[in-house]
Image (spheres, helix red, strand yellow):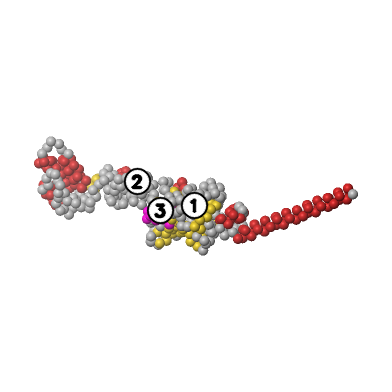
Amino acid sequence: MKSLKKLFFLFLTITLIVSCEKETEVFDNSIQKNQKKSISEIKSLTDLFESGIDIDTYTKSIPKQDDKTVKNVSQREDGLGLEFYSNAEEFPCTTLPTEDFEEAIVQGVVSFFGPLDEFTNNGVFSPGDILPGVVFTVSGGGSNEFVMLGPGFIGNNDSKVFGPNTFVDNLIINFTENNVFNVSMDVFAGAGDGNIEIEFFGNSGSLGTTIIYGTNNATYLGINSEEPIKRIEFDGFADLIDNLSFGPCDSDDDGIYDYEDNCPETANPNQADFDRDGMGDACDDDDDNDGRIDSRDSYQFSNTDPMLILNCYLDIENQEVRRGKFMNDEIQEVIDMVSALEDVSDSKRTSQFRRKMYIVVNYWWYKYRLISSREKRQILDCVNQMSYPFNQISD
């Protein structure tokens, strides 16, 4: 009897083990089947997160594209230029306002409807969390949803990352101020490495495009534009961004924005431009535009007016006397000298002016051969009519 009971329990145990193994196999097959189905049905980053499939698994299921770096800049025919940087250390603007999306309330992944700006109040962002001057929208055939990824969700990134939720939507960055000449950002491919085409728009229309190769780790992109950037449009697959910096750059930190600065890489808060050629004295190697560089010019701020300047009309050319000094410069030197005399009468200053000018004009005539005898007489006749304070000098 005991032997029969043992046989019965043995048979029952074997039956249960076999049954459990079959159920486990069916369950495992179900997981695999559901997982494959989930991968094929993934339409957004929140779907990916909720499916339990890690991003590396999903990425491996997507065909890879050829590696490409910042390139293919196409500019408008009217010459408006874009300059691109693929290295943050080379980008000239390090003090621009930066939107890093760290104010977002997110654990893992959270989606919400756009647009996103400084006034957004949706449980993820509160008013004031986003910097003023920028509005994020999406384009495409998706659900008009954004997604915030928490730290560590994508690549080796330890901060929060932002972009469209659905894979068919594209990110659009709109700038509300008309002074955004410089932009930089970290760009991510949210699901699968690949090319991301980015186009830039200003008030005149499209300014140009570039293509970067996006990965799960940050790809840096910096932009300098000759025209204010009003809009940036992405055309890729699950494009995400972080650390968006934008605004007018002040590369030399002199308080003048680059687009207004006549020496953008040399500090010159006074913006002095002696020859009015648009290049400030601080960075102009020929301040008076006389064709002689300053390092070899004994008179760097010459009066290079084409004609001689006195209080009489003289049709006489203002010529270089020597080493960057012009005839008008020597006239001004004489005026400055007699004006600086102390404890002398105005008539004494006038007399000194005429005496000194007689010497100067004679040098122009017989030593430097710059003027004719007739021009010499014209100049001296004019000098003899001048009197201190010489405030009737014509220009």
- Quickly name the residue at label 1: 123
- Quickly name the residue at label 2: 255
Q: Residue at x 42, y 61 (%)?
A: 206
Left or right: 106, with 92 as reference point: right
Q: Residue at x 16, y 49 (%)?
A: 393
Give whichever of discs 1 and 3 has the lower sequence position.
1
Q: How many marks?
A: 3
* In this view, the mark in front (1 or 3): 1
Callout 3: SS: loop
- Asked whether residue 179 is drawn in magenta, I would say yes
Disc 1: CA contacts within 10 A as few (<14), some (14-19) or many (>=20) = few
The region drawn magenta spans 174-184
Q: Quick check: marks 1 and 3 in contact, CB under 8 Å? A: no
Q: Residue at x 90, y 49 (%)?
A: 1
* In this view, the mark in front (2 or 3): 3
Q: Quick check: marks 1 and 2 in contact, CB under 8 Å? A: no
